[in-house]
Image (cartoon, helix red, strand yellow):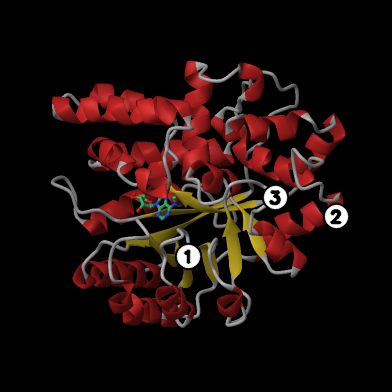
Amino acid sequence: MATISGASAAALHSLSPSDVDFLQSLPKAELHAHLNGSIPLQTLVDLAHERPTVPVDTTDEIAEKIAILRSGLTLDGILDFFPLFRAIYPLTSTPSALSRITRDVLDSFLKAQSVPPAGFTYAPVPECTYIELRTTPRATAHMSRHTYLTTVLDEVEKFSADQAALIVSIDRRMSEADAKECVDLAITLRAAGRRVVGLDLCGDPEKGDVVTFEKHFKRGKDAGLGVTLHIAEAKASTTAESLALLGWRPDRLGHATFLSDEHKALFFADPCIEICLTSNFITKTVQSLESHHIRYYLANDHPIAICVRVESRFILSRCAEIGAVDTDDTLPFRTTLLGEYAQLLAKPPLGLGLRHEQVRRIAAMSMEARFK
Ligand code: 6MZ
């Protein structure tokens, strides 16, 4: 069975040069990039070498997790995915490391890479026009949550407001007090003119009791922040929780893979669905393009945004570096948003076979769904 990186690359390879030009010319917004999940591999490797104070067993753990990422096929499911961050976090716990990863992630999305990816002949262009980067503020031995956010914002604000903004993520495993602190910081920083545009609910879908967060998300919304929620991402997500989350009146929804028709009927003001094709395949929450929920939203003319998401960027960059898959079948991380869009345009079975006008409309929807 082909890896999804292969599928993404195969879709792109199947397009004519004028199709690729068309996809590259579209203004697109990346709305679902988790900072610590989007770090270019070389940056992680550099940080691992620069941090001799990181305990050896942590380094071993990193090696082990990177080995998992290497194949891209060894994740048994979505719950296999979250522990990977335990290997990354020790490397990104100082303000200087955080600045570095933020800079490198933003550059990888917003600056055209000078070397064309192997096997592709088109001229490189920036991966997207606009990015809403999201991250969970962590208090570490080296910085407070406030310092975490201002450090990230300092880098985000080096780009114009038309190019980059920040969403503050609240991890489902947080206590209510921690969630409150994160929302307070988002509101205060925004009021002080910093470029915080939204709140996100993320984390292991099987963990935490999110109901206690409702009043804090509401405060954020009242303060003008956009709200996006990971919802019904795993089969085990309960319908009661999905119902409660929809009651928060989110502006956007992450994944929404297992949302029932009854729940979809309860949508308030048509929240844009952040669609992460490759991510869903790799975490095995969706088996194929044929059964992907994107079809429902397309058929119902519901707003969607195509997003790269963490795993695809990470795994594709891994594959490219170590040659885990045939290079003709591999996309370096910088082209993966293009690869995701290629899956919309490519003819079945490689893609959905949408028309240019439809794909143009989808890209425009991502731009329209930006938080203000
Ligand atoms: C839910 C996810 C996720 O915030 O430390 N994260 N949450 N579903 C997903 N889909 C598979 N992928 C990543 O970036 C890493 C954090 O993003 C969340 C997880 O909570 C992870 O710890 P930041 O920059």
User: Quick one: quadrant of the N terminus?
Assistant: top right
Indicate yes or no: mark 1 CB to ligand 1 under 8 Å. Answer: no
Q: Amino acid at mark 2?
A: Glu
Secondary structure at badge 3 equals loop
Q: Which residue is mark 1?
A: 232
Crowding around mark 3 (Cα neighbors within 10 Å: few <14, some 14 to 19, many 20+) is: few
Q: Which residue is mark 2?
A: 357
- The image quadrant that residue 295 belongs to is bottom right
User: In the rendered structure, which disc, 1 or 2, sits on the residue that comes first in sequence?
Assistant: 1
How many dots with numbers?
3
The spot of residue 198 in percent (x, y) is 45, 67
**In the figure, 189 relative to 217: above or below?**
above
Q: Amino acid at mark 3?
A: Glu
In percent of the image, x 62 and y 34: which residue is there? 335
User: In the rendered structure, which disc, 3 or 2, sits on the residue that comes first in sequence?
Assistant: 3
Q: Is residue 372 visible?
A: no
Indicate yes or no: mark 2 CB to ligand 1 under 8 Å. Answer: no
208 horizontally vs 191: left or right: left
Q: Which residue is mark 3?
A: 290
Q: Nearer the viewer, mark 1 or mark 2?
A: 1
Q: Is residue 231 visible?
A: yes
- Cβ–Cβ under 8 Å for marks 3 and 2: no
The spot of residue 30 in percent (x, y) is 58, 51
Crowding around mark 1 (Cα neighbors within 10 Å: few <14, some 14 to 19, many 20+) is: many
**In the figure, 121 relative to 81: above or below?**
above
- The image quadrant that residue 123 belongs to is top right
Secondary structure at badge 1 equals loop
Crowding around mark 2 (Cα neighbors within 10 Å: few <14, some 14 to 19, many 20+) is: few
User: In the rendered structure, which disc, 1 or 3, sits on the residue that comes first in sequence?
Assistant: 1
Secondary structure at badge 2 equals helix
**In the figure, 362 relative to 263: above or below?**
above
User: Quick one: quadrant of the C terminus?
Assistant: bottom right
